[in-house]
Amino acid sequence: MSISTYPPGNKLIGNFIAAGACGFAFDVVGEPNMVIKVSRLVDYGGVNPITISDFNANKSSYGDMVFAGAIGLNEFQAILFSQLYDMQKKGEETTPHLPKVYAFSSGEMQQSMLDEITRAYEYYSWSRSYYRAIMDNFHARKGKPGTRIGLWIMERVERAGKYDKVGSDSSNAKKQVVALNKWLREHNYVVRDSVNAGNWGFRKGTDEIVWFDPGVSPWPIKPEWEDDENIQLRNMYYLFKEGYGGGEIAKYKRKLENPTEYDEGWHQAEGNE
Ligand SMILES: Nc1ncnc2c1ncn2[C@@H]1O[C@H](COP(=O)(O)OP(=O)(O)O)[C@@H](O)[C@H]1O
Ligand SMILES: [Mg+2]
């Protein structure tokens, strides 16, 4: 589904592809082989100097707990995509099972991007509920600063949707996930949600499986960070607790004691998100 006309005045945001919890995917203006993902991250706290908020103390501001969990996974996914972008820019090899990343940025949502989203909504006549979901996620909440976001432009993979898959795809993914697990483990990440057929597709014209929505977390996460003085470590702990579930620290630790067995696993949270 590649389109060739874009909202006049837009430089980046094309048609709407899909909405998840606190994350949105769009076509990229003029680049039919790319997708832009915009996700909500942990809010800012203080303004002067600008700081990240205490995630645990402010969880309720994200709405229900499902959304706090999504913020956790978004934050961790942004760390990975930022690293992929940096490595690829330097010409370092990354795994073929993660996307090529053409641009990465994080910071405050800008009015100019919200305007692009509004123009795209009007141009393509998106459903109003999608538009409202985007605006509810991303407007400037308490005056200044606005919503903190991560955005990246990545390669568009083929047959990305859950219902685009055929019989043998899943057994192929189960074979190829071993290399993904290994690469991530060697770069200090664990992963979940890799079974979900709505999170992977095929590199254009190949049988290579690319996980464009891996539910990663930096690893290790330490239980003692729960009451560390350092807010960054505390946030890491609580983001993991919301995104993965507190009990998963011990489970992943146990699984990782045998790396080969870990790599061969097909890690999926309950609920198939
Ligand atoms: N790189 C990509 N290539 C092709 N389709 C994509 C890509 N990224 C996202 N999509 C499409 O958007 C949908 C939602 O994206 P995803 O990253 O899984 O976010 P979420 O799970 O939060 O909705 C996917 O199921 C897929 O159909
Ligand atoms: Mg997904």
Image (spheres, rainbow, N blue to C red):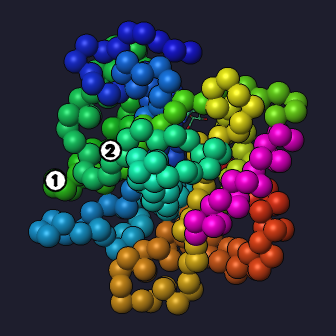
Q: Is residue 146 visible?
A: yes
SS of the residue at dot 1? loop
* Residue drawn where x is 27% and y is 63% of the image: 44
SS of the residue at dot 2? helix
Q: Earlier in the sequence, mark 1 or mark 2?
A: 2
Residue bearing mark 2: 138
Residue bearing mark 1: 143
Type of residue at label 2? Phe
Q: Residues within 10 Å of mark 2 (few under 14, many from 20)?
A: many
Judge by depth and name the residue closer to the eye, 199 or 33.
33
Provide the residue span drawn in magenta: 170-188
> Ligand 1 within 8 A of label 2's CB?
no
Type of residue at label 1? Gly
Whether residues under marks 1 and 2 lie with C-beta atoms below 8 angstroms apart, the answer is: no
Judge by depth and name the residue closer to the eye, 154 or 52.
154
Residue 268 higher or lower than 6, as above or below:
below
